[in-house]
Image (tube, grey):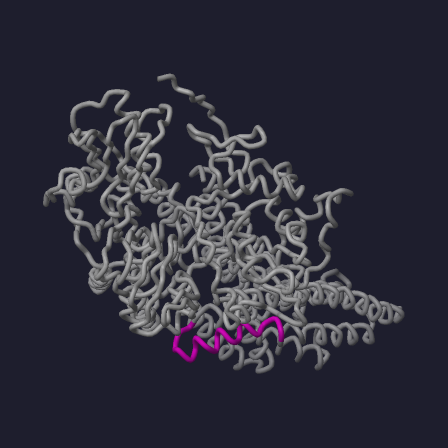
Amino acid sequence: MSVIVVLIGFSIIVAAGFLVAFLWAVRSGQYDDDVSPSVRILFDNEDEKPKQTNTNQTKV
Amino acid sequence: MQPNYIVIMAECIHCGQDCGKNPVIWDEKPFCCNGCSMVYQILSEKKLDRYYDMMPTPGIRLDQENTSGTRYAYLDNDEIRLKLLDFSDGGISRVNLFIPAIHCSSCIWLLENMNTLHHGIMHSHVNFVRKEVSITFRESDISLRQLIELLHTIHYIPDISYNKEKKDDHQKANRRMIMKIGVAGFAFGNIMLLSFPDYLPGGEAIDELMAGTFGIVSFILALPVITFCSSDFFLSAFKSLRKKIINIDLPLSIGIISLFLESSYEIFSGSGTGYMDSLAGLLFFMLIGRWYQSRTYQSLSFDRDYRSYFPIAVTRLLDGKEDFVQLKDLKTGDLILVRNGELIPVDSILTDGEGNIDYSFVTGESIPVAKKAGDFVFAGGKQSGAAIKLRVEKEVAQSYLTQLWNEDKLGEEAGIQMQSIITKVSHYFTIVILAIAFSAGVYWSFSDFGKAVYVFASILIVACPCALSLTIPFTFGNVMRVFGRNGFYIKNTEVIEKLTHADTIVFDKTGTLTHSKSMNIGWEGASLSADEEQLLRSVARNSTHPLSVMVSEWLPVSALLSVDNYKEISGLGITGFVDGHRVMLGSRRFIAGNDASDESKISSVYVSIDNKLRGFFKMENHYRDGLSEVIAGMKHMQLHLLTGDNDSEEANLRAYFSPDTQLHFNQTPVDKLEYINELKKKGRNVIMIGDGLNDAGALLKADIGITIADDIYHFSPACDAILSSSKFGRLQDYLKFSKSAMKIVYASYLISFLYNTVGLTFAIQGLLSPVFAAILMPLSSISVVTFASLSVSMLSKARKF
């Protein structure tokens, strides 16, 4: 049964990884604007149209 | 004469407004004005016309085309330029611009494709929530001035000012809040998993190693919760305690700390598993509540000072040469040049040119005031017509209006804050809980001292008023959103509670009760023939003066005849020859030569054809729709009216207001402020409803200042709430809704007190167990939140919001 202790250790490490990813996302400003990304994804890239701006760039 | 005129009632492709009687046709598409068709031409030339496919009529209409090419010339000044740029290195610069006009996905698309419009633009990125666009550009190809002029040509006019810090602070605080929620949620989930054995029957049977490990891991997970996540609560409790006020954060902090200490003791002494799951869950819910409450309107500004109204630089004339000087560096005696459409930034004396000054932002009156050389001009007006020269009489901060604004801000901070319901409740709550905890502790200490400490801690834990603290954020937070959907934007949730206490309402007249842009118009004199009307309309169409525009819109549709020798004499009137007839429109002095004294009461436009006086157009204030409903809905309150105008409108106003309403005329901005002050001294809770800068002092002084705005994103004086002018008729509904919301708050308080009573009965007997706490605490929070949210949404449906 004590193997559970090890498992819990691992599960918390995995969960902490996600927490760090979340904190990074917040710090990099991904939660600052929750409207335009949802709109931006619907813009089509057309060939004769000029290159679409890089939409992943969220750092302001 | 055959009318060569086709009536097309169409929507402008660009801005969606009615094209009126004379649409501009381009590319077989109708446009309401040349400005709109120009933007269309630019965009279709650059193959950006998909702008019009994404959203119907996405464009922005400019009411006043500012044609002067030097409007943004001050951006070439290095000091100003560097202050505005976020970043500049090696010829590549980045600027972050606030563009209030951003409103749809087409806007995002166009602004992010700015690089097509000019090759010097490298990248642009829109933040829709804050209505900002961040543009990176090569300064060798396009200067900041050219960039902003380019935005101007496509009608996305940036609001250029220095106050950025406030917005950045808000963003930082918001990020921190989200991070805290994330950490608390993480700890909550994991600790709950570890506490699971406690929740199930037979959980005591797990072996000691595991129980010990679970306890230690829970403790480690709880550390960031007690340090990072709870810091705001501790800080706020500490701050208010120093001011000798007990706010809700004090009992919360006591609860949090006793939870943590009791749990740590149990874990390390091996006597139990503690309540770390309850602790993390509690913080998680409460942080969500705080975050919900703080989600206000990021793109709206409620506390602007005069600096954001005035331009950041003006043209100064020095030894006959023009240069640009920042507003704050302007000195008494400087000569400045103000062009068409520019603001007069300081109190000054007109030295050269004909002033035709529109004070609509100051007084709400849109008809320009004529000024001649030698006249004193107050800051805040907008010149329309040719450029004028002015000599600065007072520095910016000392000007009449700005001074009023500054002084009052200080007064506001020193004033006593109204005690909100939550502060009052927390005050008694804390005292009662501490009394219960001590007496129960003393009672148990006679039999079992260990148990006494445990009971003492349990009472503080279970009494932690988290449900209580969630009531206001969720009830008022939802009310705020309901109001926002209906054109009433509130600064923060405290305003709603203040609204329920208001017993006195003070109105401004011009621009608040009346429309600032439209008036009732009537013809006095012998009736005009159709031919004469055609003559008048042809002449009036040439002028952009608000009165001429009103006259030409009032006259029936007819073909426009060509006008020879057209002249516009500022402050007097217009004249021209049509079809051999001399047509004159203007003031009485202009037409008849004499100045009648009774004239000032009503605006009128006199008309003469072939030097014969034909009569005059009478313009009267047009009261907002729904005014009588608003007044009827506020019968139980004391109403007052303050206006800077004379008493010519008294009879019309009396028709709306009851006889006991106090109407005060000829009020200066200082009078208004003093009047509010007097009312407050009498112990009244005052709502001030105004619109212009002349109300700014009164708006700040009142318990609640509500600004009426045609365009909520444009400049409005500092206030607690902004009401979209189209929703004026529902004002009384908002007040009633706030009162009902207050009842919801009372009901929620009752629910949370019931939970507390149940919890306390167990805690006093020393029967509080971790499982019991883990169920009771989230349950009370969730049921209060559900009750508050559901009641508000049901109420909003019932009230048709």
Q: Is residue A24 left or right of residue B56?
A: right
Q: Is residue B484 above or below residue B337?
A: above
Q: Is residue A60 visible?
A: yes
Q: Is residue B75 above or below residue B636?
A: below
Q: Is residue B795 above or below residue B577?
A: below
Count of numbered labels shown in the rendering:
0
| The C terminus of chain B, quarter of image | top left
Which residue: 47% across, 64% down? B74
The percent coordinates of residue B612 (x first, y second) are 16, 30
Q: Indicate whether residue A38 is drawn in magenta.
A: no
Which residue: 61% across, 45% down? B105
Between B400 and A19, the residue placed more toward the observer is B400
Which residue: 66% across, 46% down? A39
Between B769 and B305, the residue placed more toward the observer is B305
Q: Is the magenta region chiefly helix, strand or loop?
A: helix
The percent coordinates of residue B297 (x first, y second) are 50, 55
> Residue pushed farthest top?
B2
Magenta stretch, residue numbers: B228-246
| The N terminus of chain B, quarter of image | top left
Q: Is residue B460 visible?
A: no
Q: Is residue B112 left or right of residue B459?
A: right
Q: Indicate whether residue B235 is drawn in magenta.
A: yes
